[in-house]
Amino acid sequence: MKKELSFGLIALVMVGLAGCGAKNSSDNAAQNSKTASLTAENASLKRAKSAQSASLKATNSSLKQAQQATKEASNSTSNVTNESENESVHLTDEQKAKVNAAFLAWASQQAEIGKMAVSDWYFDHGSAGHGDWYAQTPDGKVQVQDFGVPGAGQFPIHAVGGCVFYTAKDGTIGHDKLYAGSFADNYAVNMDFTKPVSKYLLGDNGVVYELKTGNGTAVSTNTGFGEYSDDGQTAGTVDRTFMVSKDGAARAELQKLLATYR
């Protein structure tokens, strides 16, 4: 009887162990399947991220190429525009007078805003020789009076006209007729030399050149200008050099006026 009980107990234990083994095996299989599934998902996510990263890189590369192409095209257009704007325009004396009159009208408005006076008597001289008169600029000599010695062909730039901004002694604001006195009196008639004085020289290359003076220094109509010798071989010295004006509005106005003749 005891033997039968022992065998029965052993059988039950073995069945229980077999059941546990089967359960553990099933659990392990499920765990392995879950791990494999997670590994596959991670691999899929990595592939998706890698593909997305590659796509973004390609997009950024295309965008940079497009931006570079746009920049180069813009620079090219800008260079062409600048070259066109700086090309000299051949004008007759009548055309120069029209451009200068229109510029003076614009300058008069600017002078009123700045509470200053302006006159087109920017250049003149008394008795002199037979050589051409010119102004010196960073871009070369600008012919301001043509006597044919050495002649217009010897100058890279030619004056279209000009004006002079200043503070008037009599309080005039805007356009002022500065010719009231004799040539000997010159600017002293109505120009306050203790205040800033600016001469604007309009080049046929579309550039506005400026000579800043005054502030305690006497100024005359030939300040900033020189004369060639009678044989046209030697350029007389100039006391001051005109610089490219930083007045962008003045340049824009001159460019607009010259555009009609380009």
Image (tube, rainbow, N blue to C red):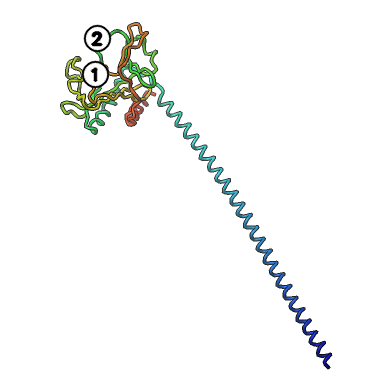
Count of number-bearing discs: 2
Viewer-nearest residue: 150 or 108: 150
Q: Is residue 29 above or below residue 191?
A: below
Residue at image location 25% in from the left, 18% down from the top: 221
Q: Quadrant of residue 210?
A: top left
Q: Is residue 58 left or right of residue 199?
A: right
Where is residue 149 shown, x and y percent of the image? 35, 9
Q: Secondary structure at mark 1?
A: loop
Residue at image location 60% in from the left, 48% down from the top: 54
- Dot 2 crowding, Cα within 10 Å, few <14, some 14–19, many 20+: few
Q: Is residue 17 visible?
A: yes
Where is residue 236 shown, x and y percent of the image? 33, 12
Residue at image location 17% in from the left, 26% down from the top: 169
Residue at image location 43% in from the left, 26% down from the top: 83
Q: Which residue is mark 1?
A: 220
> The C terminus appears in which quarter of the rendering?
top left
Q: Secondary structure at mark 2?
A: loop
Q: Is residue 53 left or right of residue 92?
A: right
> The N terminus appears in which quarter of the rendering?
bottom right
Q: Amino acid at mark 2?
A: Ser
Residue that protrudes farthest toward the top in the picture: 231
- Dot 1 crowding, Cα within 10 Å, few <14, some 14–19, many 20+: some
User: Cα distance, mark 1 to mark 2?
Assistant: 15 Å
Q: Which residue is mark 2?
A: 127
Cβ atoms under marks 1 and 2 closer than 8 Å: no
Where is residue 115 shown, x and y percent of the image? 21, 32
Where is residue 232 shown, x and y percent of the image? 36, 8
Q: Is residue 58 above or below residue 204?
A: below
Q: Quadrant of residue 234?
A: top left
